[in-house]
Image (spheres, rainbow, N blue to C red):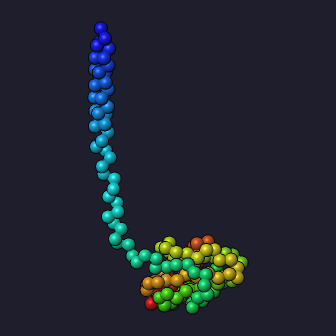
Amino acid sequence: MRHRPLVTLAAGAILLLAACSSGGATSAPTTAASAAPSAEAPAAPPAAACAESAAAGEVSVAIKDFAFGPADIQAKVGQTVTFTNNDSAPHTATLDDGSCTTPNISNGASDGLVLSAAGTYPFHCSVHPTMKGTITVS
Ligand SMILES: [Cu+2]
């Protein structure tokens, strides 16, 4: 009389275990293939070729009447190209590739970009995308 409930309890536990392990088995195969996309990273160009700088620069560019002057800028590697805004509207100098930008430069203020690798860097004003220029670094 006393053994009966124990036996049914054990049978119930086995059923429960079976249900559990089969449930685990069906959900397992989908979790393996999600750690691959880092294989394309080595193709990246030299990191941080451009940095924003508020320091007074070796190369000066005036922004006036919604244009960069000059628009074709020559600089040496490591020089700071400083943009001074003579307009009442705010402007930026933002590399077309998005790698760096000045903050909004308000009237009378200056800010600059430093390029640490030779190359040709087209840029624009993020407030007025029709304002364009190119920094050639050698
Ligand atoms: Cu602008």
Asked if residue 1 is positioned above or below residue 105 in the image, the reply reads: above
Picture residue at 32% right of the left edge, 31% below the top:
20
Q: Position of residue 120 (x, y in %)?
A: 45, 83
Left or right, 93 with reference to 30: right
Q: Position of residue 73 (x, y in %)?
A: 53, 88
Q: Position of residue 137 (x, y in %)?
A: 47, 87
The quarter of the image holding the N terminus is: top left
Q: Position of residue 85 (x, y in %)?
A: 66, 82
Q: Does the image show residue 67?
A: no
Residue nearer the viewer, 102 or 24:
24
Residue nearer the viewer, 105 or 6:
6
The quarter of the image holding the C terminus is: bottom left
Q: Spot the residue most to the top.
A: 1
The image quadrant that residue 19 belongs to is top left
Picture residue at 57% right of the left edge, 91% below the top:
58
Q: Does the image show residue 54?
A: yes
Picture residue at 31% right of the left edge, 36% below the top:
24
Picture residue at 30% right of the left edge, 29% below the top:
17
Q: Spot the residue most to the front.
A: 2
- Count of labels in the image: 0
Left or right, 110 with reference to 16: right
